[in-house]
């Protein structure tokens, strides 16, 4: 039996990177994946990849995780198609980096809405279905929510991800009477197409970050997804309110340093 057999999993941001890896892996573990992304054509490609491997996935339409109507449609399509929701994996997000003295309020608010409000909204709308299924919530934090950084100016990102970690703990508290578990996975530096265009770009101060990671390499999306599958499975039945850091030991050794 597969670890997530028959469970209906809402996964946002499946077009690429960690979201695509999550959708593929959850489907391979038997989940019925209901995905979405603003990059709809790329999300449909993820759906095709899942089908090619014999899995089941539904992509109802473009998903804007900051828009209540869009998120509600996404959740309702999952319920109509598969009868309920067992897992909410709030993966999608977007960030605009900037220092406190130079970032505009518009960019700060954009980041908070995309990375924190979106998590609240997805869980809020799915909550009645999670109550019925005694389901679980997976959120995506970051080492940015745990430490400051001398090399990356990221006030909004640090605030939003710290908020995600705190929100997850509160969801665990509010969900416990209904059997709902809520846990967070906090990645460090993960090598994706997106990170290669900013934090890992040749002209960025963090380009040589791998040399500071105790395990000697950057993370890859599957490192994060392995943790998420565990937390969504029955193997983690007695785990809730946890923040599982997946960073190769980076934040342990260099808290607030060159991250």
Image (cartoon, rainbow, N blue to C red):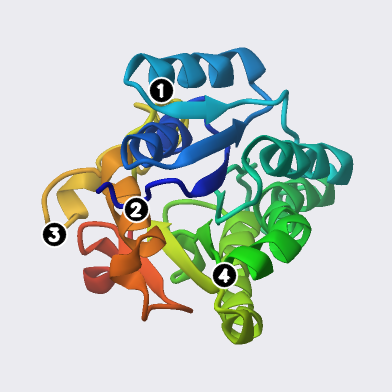
Which residue is disc 3 drawn over? 214
Which residue is disc 2 drawn over? 229
Nearer-N-terminus badge (2/1): 1
Quadrant that contains the C terminus: bottom left
The span from disc 2 to disc 1 (Cα, nearest Å) is 16 Å
User: Is residue 32 in sight in this rendering?
Assistant: yes
Q: Toward the viewer: 103 or 58?
A: 58
Nearer-N-terminus badge (4/3): 4
Q: Is residue 71 left or right of residue 215?
A: right
Q: Nearer the viewer, mark 3 or mark 1?
A: 1
Numbered disc total: 4
Res 76 → quadrant: top right
Q: Nearer the viewer, mark 2 or mark 3?
A: 2
Q: Nearer the viewer, mark 4 or mark 1?
A: 4
Q: Secondary structure at mark 3?
A: loop
The span from disc 4 to disc 1 (Cα, nearest Å) is 26 Å
Which residue is disc 4 drawn over? 134
Res 120 → quadrant: bottom right
Q: Toward the viewer: 244 or 257?
A: 244
Which residue is disc 1 drawn over? 50
Residues at discs 4 and 1 in contact (Cβ within 8 Å): no
| Residue 131: percent from left, percent from top | 67, 70
Q: Is residue 231 left or right of residue 40?
A: left
């Amino acid at each position: 039996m597969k670890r997530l057999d028959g469970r209906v999993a809402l996964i946002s941001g499946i077009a690429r990177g960690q979201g695509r890896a999550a959708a593929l892996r959850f489907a391979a573990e038997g989940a019925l994946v209901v995905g979405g992304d603003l990059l709809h054509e790329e999300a449909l490609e993820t759906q095709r990849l899942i089908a090619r491997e014999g899995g089941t996935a539904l992509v109802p339409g473009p998903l804007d995780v900051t828009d209540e109507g869009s998120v509600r449609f996404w959740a309702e399509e999952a319920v109509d198609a598969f009868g309920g929701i067992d897992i909410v994996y709030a993966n999608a997000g977007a960030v605009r980096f900037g220092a406190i003295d130079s970032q505009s309020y518009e960019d700060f608010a954009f980041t908070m809405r995309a990375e924190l409000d979106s998590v609240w909204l997805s869980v809020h709308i799915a909550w009645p279905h999670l109550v019925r299924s005694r389901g679980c919530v997976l959120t995506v934090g970051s080492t940015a929510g745990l430490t400051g950084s001398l090399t990356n100016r990221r006030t909004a990102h640090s605030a939003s991800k710290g908020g995600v970690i705190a929100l997850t703990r509160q969801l665990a508290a509010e969900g416990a009477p209904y059997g709902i578990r809520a846990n967070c996975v906090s990645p460090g530096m993960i090598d994706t197409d997106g990170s290669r265009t900013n934090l890992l770009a040749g002209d960025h101060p963090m380009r040589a970050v791998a040399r500071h990671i105790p395990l000697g390499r950057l993370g890859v999306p599957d490192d994060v997804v392995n943790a998420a599958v565990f937390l969504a499975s029955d193997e983690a039945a007695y785990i809730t309110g946890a923040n599982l850091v997946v960073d190769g030991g980076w934040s342990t050794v260099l808290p607030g340093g060159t991250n």
